[in-house]
Image (spheres, helix red, strand yellow):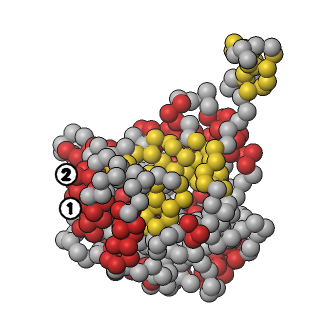
């Protein structure tokens, strides 16, 4: 399972361009380390001050945890390689032997890595692995990327394609569910695979053709349907493609008169923030209006590197929203979610969606009761700024689309008054004559 090589992304063109310039991370917080602290970690001079809005020449560092991980397991890798997204991609950890080198695996994790037939391969960038606990199997980030034997259990109502995307696919790689927008899947590759992935049936296995013919068919479908005004580019992760290939796709979409704006879904700022280079941002800003949905799960992902990546995207004029999946043992409490959304706002990312975990096959150990999501929304609404409160939604199984779920703040009526409950439980009347 763990040694599948299908997601090498030949379509992605990882070798199409020269390696980007070094992207040096910005220190904002001190990470919780699991190694002994070095005496005097060497500072790094930021050369990307213009793109980050920071003072040129200021000496900044990554978190202690990432520096300690590099010292322990990648001592001979210089900054120019560690901060090169292509090096990170080529050196993903994908096998049992590679994981055993950096982690103390539990029996369940070893068993899952040793079994064949899992839907989703293993792939973790060295950078993201530096955020994973070496010996705590219950650490939130570790649970999301390290396989567990529970993945092999099929629960009630689970399905390989729970959202019914395949039934709304008129041409390969394009999902047309809503009248005015489509989902364009440009690759089946990701730099790191989430164990709860809704598209685990297709990503990472090399089943999606990477030639231009498939994309041309999808583009032609969009051209022939003038009701389509909004295209969401996803995958896999579209930023696993090289800049030139992405530019090719965006340029052709921009040439379609009825396509008003483009959106892109990516987890790169969390798992491979080095991918967000100045070169990439210069290319993306040519294609406005362009929006990005970023996938952040937990406050531990909001590192200096991620902060820099989001700053570059925001400075390129790209509105950023976060799509977070509610996961048991990862972010299913008010305090964790509040810390996450506060970090996101500081990173200029608007918390947009909080998703109930889809009933993908083998996901029962990740799913929470819907009541837990409502509890979290109630714990945010009124207790922090409204910008920090995401929309809690269930993507209805079978292709029903996103359905918002909100606490009931309408208590009832009394004559011509509507009775409302506020965030503190107080009752208020609003004149609303029938």
Image-based side of 390 in relation to 431, left or right:
left
- Count of numbered badges drawn on the protein: 2
**Residue 400 in view (yes/no):** yes
| x 73%, y 33%: residue | 408
Image height of 8 relative to 333, above or below: below
| x 19%, y 71%: residue | 18
Image-based side of 373 in relation to 95, left or right:
right
In the picture of the structure, the residue carrying the numbered disc 1 is: 21
> Which SS class for mark 1?
loop
Q: Nearer the viewer, residue 297 or 265?
A: 265
The image shows residue 196 at horizontal and vertical percentages of 60, 65
Category of crowding for the residue at label 1, using alpha-carbon neighbours closer than 10 angstroms: few (below 14), some (14–19), many (at least 20)? some
Image quadrant assignment for residue 109: bottom right
Which tag is nearer the camera, tag 2 or tag 1? Answer: 1
The image shows residue 79 at horizontal and vertical percentages of 27, 64
> Which SS class for mark 2?
loop
The image shows residue 325 at horizontal and vertical percentages of 59, 54
| x 30%, y 53%: residue | 257
Image-based side of 105 in relation to 223, left or right:
right
The image shows residue 235 at horizontal and vertical percentages of 45, 67
Image height of 411 relative to 327, above or below: above
Q: Nearer the viewer, residue 434 or 190?
A: 434
Q: Which of 163 and 363 is in front in this view?
A: 163
Image height of 208 relative to 399, above or below: below
Category of crowding for the residue at label 2, using alpha-carbon neighbours closer than 10 angstroms: few (below 14), some (14–19), many (at least 20)? some
Among the two numbered marks 2 and 1 on one chain, the one whose residue lies closer to the N terminus: 1
The label on residue 279 is none
Q: Do the residues labelled 2 and 1 touch (CB within 8 Å)?
A: yes
In the picture of the structure, the residue carrying the numbered disc 2 is: 47
Q: How far apart are marks 2 and 1 (CA)?
A: 10 Å
Query: Can you say which quadrant of the picture contains the C terminus?
Result: top right
| x 68%, y 26%: residue | 423
């Amino acid at each position: 399972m763990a040694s599948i090589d299908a997601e090498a992304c030949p379509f992605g063109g990882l070798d199409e361009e020269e390696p980007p310039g070094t992207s040096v991370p910005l220190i904002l917080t001190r990470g919780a380390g699991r190694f002994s602290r070095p005496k005097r970690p060497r500072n790094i001079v930021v050369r990307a001050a213009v793109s980050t809005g920071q003072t040129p020449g200021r000496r900044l560092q990554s978190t202690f945890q990432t520096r300690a991980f590099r010292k322990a397991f990648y001592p001979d890798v210089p900054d120019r390689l560690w901060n090169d997204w292509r090096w990170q991609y080529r050196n993903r950890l994908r096998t049992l032997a590679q994981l055993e080198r950096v982690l103390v695996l539990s029996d369940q994790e070893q068993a899952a890595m040793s079994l064949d037939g899992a839907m989703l391969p293993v792939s973790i960038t060295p950078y993201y692995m530096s955020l994973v606990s070496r010996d705590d199997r219950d650490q939130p980030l570790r649970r999301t990327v390290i396989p567990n034997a529970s993945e092999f259990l099929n629960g009630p109502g689970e399905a390989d394609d729970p959202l019914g995307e395949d039934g709304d696919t008129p041409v390969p790689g394009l999902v047309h569910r809503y009248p005015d927008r489509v989902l364009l899947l440009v690759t089946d590759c990701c730099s790191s695979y989430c164990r709860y992935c809704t598209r685990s049936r297709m990503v990472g296995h090399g089943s999606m053709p990477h030639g231009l013919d498939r994309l041309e068919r999808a583009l032609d479908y969009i051209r022939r349907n003038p009701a389509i005004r909004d295209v969401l580019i996803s995958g896999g992760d579209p930023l696993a493609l090289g800049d030139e290939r992405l530019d090719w796709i965006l340029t052709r979409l921009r040439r379609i008169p009825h396509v008003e704006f483009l959106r892109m879904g990516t987890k790169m700022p969390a798992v491979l923030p080095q991918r967000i280079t100045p070169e990439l941002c210069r290319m993306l800003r040519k294609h406005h209006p362009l929006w990005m949905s970023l996938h952040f799960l937990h406050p531990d992902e909001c590192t200096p590197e991620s902060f820099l990546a989001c700053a570059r995207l925001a400075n390129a004029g790209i509105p950023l929203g976060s799509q977070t999946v509610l996961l048991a043992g990862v972010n299913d409490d008010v305090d964790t979610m509040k810390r996450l959304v506060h970090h996101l706002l500081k990173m200029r990312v608007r918390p947009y969606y909080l998703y109930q975990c889809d009933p993908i096959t083998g996901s029962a150990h990740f799913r929470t009761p819907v009541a837990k999501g409502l509890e979290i929304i109630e714990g945010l609404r009124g207790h922090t700024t409204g910008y920090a409160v995401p929309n809690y939604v269930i993507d209805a199984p079978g292709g029903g689309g996103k359905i918002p779920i909100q606490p009931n703040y309408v208590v009832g009526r009394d004559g011509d008054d509507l009775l409302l409950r506020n965030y503190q439980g107080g009752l208020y009347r609003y004149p609303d004559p029938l």
